[in-house]
Image: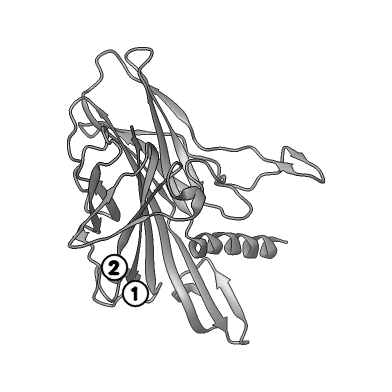
Amino acid sequence: MIRLKKLALTSILFSCYLNAHSLWINTYESYVDKPGHITTGLGWGDTFPIDDVFNSKHERLFISNFSITSPKGIISKLKIPNSKGTNPLVENKNYSIYDADFAFVKIDLTKNYEKGVYKISSSSRPTIYTKYIDKNNKIKMALKPINEINNLKKVLMSIKYQAFANSYISLGKWQEPKATNKNLEIIPLSDISNIKVGDIVRFKVLFNGKELNTSPQNMDFISARSNTFGQNDGYKLMSYIKNGYAQIKVQTPGQWIVTCNHKYDVHKNGDFKNLYGKVNQLFTASTLTFNVK
């Protein structure tokens, strides 16, 4: 029974990578009651802004971080959603009802809150997927690096996957966010707190502090869609990344999500040489969400 559960979990997590599900942050501002409040939570799946739950039996994701950072760099941890399997609240021949945990929290602003740009960020737990042929010529999958697999004959694919998500709230004057030079970053170069239909929004895209650039080896690009543009019709905006820069022209008001997926081949003398012999590739996903007036 334990072995079957492990195989099922491996298949669920592996399907997340193959289907390229996204992690994103939903953020809403309200200033009706002064000084105002921010409501924020997480999204996971394909349909923006709310789709699947993190403990889905089909596509599961474990969150390792969800936090808000003040303009002066003070980090406050936010709620982590439940990703463990759970029994349905109601189950019958028509449907099963599950508790949906999107980690929504309300952030009440104080009277003398610090002015500037607040960063809300989240990341998933790094996960390794290895698909291989064992010495009995059977195809298997494991949540282990190559060097920890026994009875290994041939590696078909070995990937370390991690997802990142960011959103920014400007309380006062907009300031361009600073790069952390870690992981995959989509940094807005435009004031995304005041975007209107027809505006061109520019981004800087970095991987481990280095500018991404479209090449024959990696067709790096960003895509953008909204719950009011493209999503319901199955298409999105796309911009190739050139020397670390990309841009889109906003088409409609509403919530927008910008996505970038980057594949990196692990080499013996590369930036991630500590992973050499453990995985063949890194697959990193990143999203940025903002609201358009």
Tell whether 278 sits left or right of 141. Answer: left
Image location (x, y in percent) of residue 171: 25, 25
Circle count: 2
The quarter of the picture where residue 7 lies is bottom right
Classify 59 as above or below 108. below
Numbered disc 2: secondary structure: loop
Q: Secondary structure at mark 1?
A: loop
Colouring scheme, one of rainbow, by chain, secondary structure, one colour: one colour
Q: Decide: is 155 above or below 73.
A: below
Instruction: Tell me the quadrant of the picture where the C terminus can be found.
Output: top left
Find disc 1 in the rendering and name its residue: 276
Residue that label 2 marks: 272
Q: Amino acid at mark 1?
A: Tyr
Residue 12 in view here: yes
Residue 150 appears in the rendering: no
Tag 1–tag 2 contact (CB < 8 Å): yes
Q: Nearer the viewer, residue 237 or 261?
A: 237
Q: Quadrant of residue 272?
A: bottom left
Of residues 171 and 201, which is closer to you in this image? 201
